[in-house]
Image (tube, grey):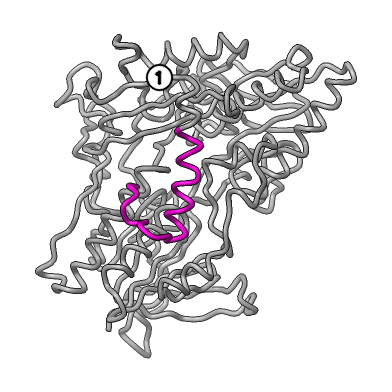
């Protein structure tokens, strides 16, 4: 009997673990190690953050689902990887520390035959002084929608802002990225327009100054270098698409900005041209940068070998080309295909946990040398697709032997993705931008000029997009709960 350990129970890890268990059956063991007791459909956190959903609408307990699936669930965080075993045994293992199940603080060694790292990111609030509390957690100066609990807190703060506005007190709202190297502009993009939408419904829009701040060099970059897409039969840039939306909603923007420090009511920033400034606010939601969760790896003698498995940013090395060098040398083929670790063939990474070879957007730095550019998005649909492909590879290795197995591929440079970005919730008043992009990582050799196939890259905004997003909310939670027919729902 082989044992597969999946570290992480988010979109990618949950997908990998549940498919692996379905394909392996009871002949082999699947273990999920995650510090969370609940699964969170993160895309809907923005609706919790404006009071249009409750926390209970976006989470559910993991234990019953894994028990039904026959998956060994450990509510714990992985601390270290020992791919050579130790002096007592050659058997590979990880060390975990329990965060629940009545074993809080206890550590345990779990041996594995195959390992999938799907831990997602560490929310690196402390990368920006004042954005974090100095202890790795969100500080008190701003709010976040990165977790369900964060979103609940964000809504409570937002409602106070609305109440002040109703009393005639003009309020300043700032939403965007909280560091020059952030990703996940999409979540902030959705949140700012949901705030704007709710402000109109509450009758306080004219008392709010709502502003966008981002590390993008242009609106609509989204960490993908922007895109050209068909809208109403015409090919337009995401820059024009985004600028139109911001202008229509009367939301000014400040881009190419690195938030260098946050104080109560103040965000200090540096722009690409080297100038600095301060944005004052009464309410701010600034997305933190992401980092690896901070695993350590040790050899048989107990010596640190973390840099063998992980990149300096803490994400796991996979079959990518990490030495491409300057931007002019970058190619779509640099991106990983199988997500197998090059040193340890029984180790894979998926979702945000894998180290990208380089940025997707063109790199940029201020005249002072401060990097200000979005890092690559690896969330949502790509995370699910990659998690399923990795699970398929591991299952083939277990069933057919590592030497004979076919490794399944899911390169982001050959992958299409769909995104539905909410711009306000409501059965008849909601809007969302529904977009498809193919491929996610542009291939300028195959598609000169735009890097993407405009026949499969298109977008529309309207009420239909909102309905789609609302349907997807229920569909993916249904899938994650392993309800009848769950495997038929695409990633």
Q: In this view, does 455 lie to the left or right of 163?
A: left
**Residue at coordinates 32% horizontally, 21% vertically from top-left?**
458
Q: In which quarter of the image is the N terminus?
A: bottom left
Q: Is residue 403 left or right of residue 58?
A: left
Is residue 181 or residue 444 the one in the foreground?
444
> Which of the 4 image quadrants contains residue 204?
top right
**Residue at coordinates 38% horizontally, 80% vertically from top-left?**
111
Dot 1 corresponds to which residue? 460
Determine the residue located farthest toward the bottom in the rendered image. 88
Q: Is residue 303 visible?
A: no
Is residue 134 or residue 111 the one in the foreground?
111
Q: Where is residue 148 in the image (x, y as percent from the top left)?
A: 63, 48
Q: In this view, does 68 lie to the left or right of 142?
A: left
Question: Is 431 contained in the magenta span?
Answer: no
> Which of the 4 image quadrants contains residue 239?
top left
Is residue 248 or residue 137 the one in the foreground?
248
219 shown above or below 184: above
**Residue at coordinates 65% horizontally, 41% vertically from top-left?**
53
98 shown above or below 296: below
Q: Where is residue 414 in the image (x, y as percent from the top left)?
A: 21, 38
Tell me the magenta residue range: 468-491
Q: Position of residue 136 (x, y in %)?
A: 64, 52
Determine the residue located farthest toward the right in the rendered image. 167
The image shows a total of numbered marks equal to 1
409 shown above or below 447: below
Q: Can residue 431 be seen in this view?
A: yes
**Residue at coordinates 66% horizontally, 26% vertically from top-left?**
195
Question: Is 489 contained in the magenta span?
Answer: yes
Q: Where is residue 27 in the image (x, y as percent from the top left)?
A: 27, 81
Q: Main SS type for the magenta part?
A: helix
Badge 1: residue crowd in 10 Å (few <14, some 14–19, many ≥20): some
Q: Is residue 249 left or right of residue 185?
A: right
């Amino acid at each position: 009997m082989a044992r597969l350990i999946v570290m992480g129970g988010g979109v990618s890890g949950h997908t990998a673990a549940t498919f692996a268990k379905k394909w392996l059956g009871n002949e082999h063991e699947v273990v999920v190690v995650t510090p969370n007791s609940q699964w969170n459909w993160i895309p809907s956190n923005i609706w919790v953050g404006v009071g249009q959903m409750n926390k209970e609408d976006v989470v559910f307990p993991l234990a019953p689902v894994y028990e039904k699936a026959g998956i060994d669930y450990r509510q714990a965080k992985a601390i270290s990887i020992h791919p050579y075993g130790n002096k007592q045994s050659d058997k590979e293992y990880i060390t975990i520390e329990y965060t629940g199940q009545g074993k809080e603080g206890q550590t345990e060694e779990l041996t594995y035959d195959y390992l999938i790292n799907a831990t997602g990111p560490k929310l690196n609030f402390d990368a920006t002084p004042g954005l974090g509390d100095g202890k790795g957690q969100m500080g008190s100066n701003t709010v976040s929608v990165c977790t369900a609990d964060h979103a609940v807190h964000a809504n409570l703060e937002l409602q106070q802002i609305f109440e002040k506005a109703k009393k005639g007190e003009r309020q300043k709202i700032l939403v965007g990225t909280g560091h020059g190297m952030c990703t996940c502009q999409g979540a902030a993009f959705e949140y700012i327009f949901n705030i704007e939408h709710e402000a109109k419904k509450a009758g306080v829009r004219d008392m709010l100054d709502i502003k966008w701040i981002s590390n993008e060099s242009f609106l609509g970059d989204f960490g993908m270098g922007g895109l050209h897409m068909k809208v109403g039969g015409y090919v337009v840039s995401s820059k024009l698409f985004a600028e139109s939306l911001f202008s229509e909603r009367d939301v000014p923007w400040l881009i190419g900005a690195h938030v260098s420090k946050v104080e109560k009511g103040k965000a200090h920033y540096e722009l690409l041209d080297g100038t600095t400034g301060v944005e004052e606010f009464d309410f701010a939601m600034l997305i933190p940068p992401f980092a690896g969760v901070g695993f350590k790896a040790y050899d048989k003698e107990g010596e640190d070998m973390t840099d063998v498995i992980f990149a300096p940013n803490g994400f796991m090395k996979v079959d990518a080309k990490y030495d491409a060098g300057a931007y002019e040398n970058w190619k779509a083929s640099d991106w990983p295909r199988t997500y197998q670790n090059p040193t340890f063939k029984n180790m894979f990474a998926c979702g945000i946990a894998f180290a990208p070879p380089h940025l997707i957007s063109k790199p940029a730095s201020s005249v002072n040398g401060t990097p200000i550019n979005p890092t690559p998005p690896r969330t949502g649909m790509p995370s699910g697709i990659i998690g399923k492909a990795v699970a398929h590879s591991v299952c083939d290795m277990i069933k057919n032997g590592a030497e004979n197995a076919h490794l399944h591929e899911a390169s982001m440079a050959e992958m299409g993705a769909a995104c539905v970005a909410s711009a306000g919730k409501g059965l008849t008043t909601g809007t969302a931008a529904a977009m498809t992009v193919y491929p996610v990582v542009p291939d300028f050799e195959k598609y000169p000029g735009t890097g993407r196939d405009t026949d499969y890259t298109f977008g529309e905004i309207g009420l239909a997009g909102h309905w789609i997003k609302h349907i997807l909310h229920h569909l993916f939670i249904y899938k994650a709960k392993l309800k009848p027919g769950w495997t038929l729902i695409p990633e």
